[in-house]
Image (cartoon, rainbow, N blue to C red):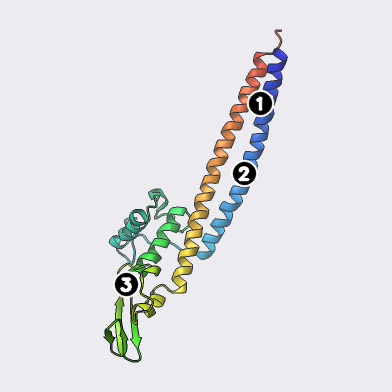
Amino acid sequence: MRARLKILGVLMVASGIFGAGVGLFTLVKTMEGVNSLQAFSTAQGVNLSYNDAGELVDRGETEGAQKILDLVTKDWGYAIVKSDLNSKDPLVNTASEYMYQMGTIAYHTLNSTVTVTLKEDVEYKGEKFAAGDYEFVNDGRYWTGFDRQHPIEGPARGMIWSPTAHALIGQLGVGAVTASTLTIGLGLVGVIGGLAGTLGILGLGLIWVVRKPD
């Protein structure tokens, strides 16, 4: 029985060593991702705006920043980590900052105003539109919320939801997911390391318990 328990202890220690190796490999790969994302963020040089009191602002106003936060947290249901929004580190390089920046682009797109010019009179569904300029206010419409056949809404859709807006939102979304995944990776390293250490300690303890008396 003592020999079997000793073998079990040895196996537990070996499993702990293997787990530590897996944890180290995961840490190295995760840190490569973290460093790459940091380099990408630094190269872009996008910074959030704060006032002298360290409060987040949009176009100089805290109210604007709060509306963006409401869009991200209430409308989209994303849980922003407030500690990531740090005036001493304004560079956009965390999941929360990426999501806030994506919210900034989306908010101003959802509330933008464009001018549509009709070169000739148009009739649509019984309504007549004379040639001329029309100011179109986007009252929170996403890309799919426009009537593409409408002589005003149709052209406004492409002007408001431009390729640039789509590209920026897509890029920022990828950045947010990447940052979140890397955070999970670091957490996984901690779990693996904890399990490996526990197995190793228990294995050594078992070997010590079943050792032959002096």
Q: Is 16 on the left-hand or right-hand side of 181? A: right
Specify whether 41 is left or right of 131: right
Q: Which residue is mark 1?
A: 12
Considering depth in this image, is 132 or 120 the residue closer to the camera? 120
Q: Secondary structure at mark 2?
A: helix
44 w.r.t. 127: above or below: above
Q: CA distance from mark 2 to mark 1?
A: 21 Å
Q: Amino acid at mark 2?
A: Thr
Question: If the image is split into quadrants, where does the N terminus sit?
Answer: top right
Q: Which residue does the numbered mark 3 point to in the structure image?
A: 138
Q: Of label 2 and label 3, which has the lower sequence position?
A: 2
- Does 208 appear above or below 34? above
Mark nearest the camera among 2 and 3 is 3
Tag 2 and tag 1, C-beta contact below 8 Å? no
Q: Report how far apart the C-alphas of labels 3 and 1 lie in the structure.
A: 63 Å
Relative to 141, is 209 above or below? above
- Which residue is labeled 2 in the image? 26
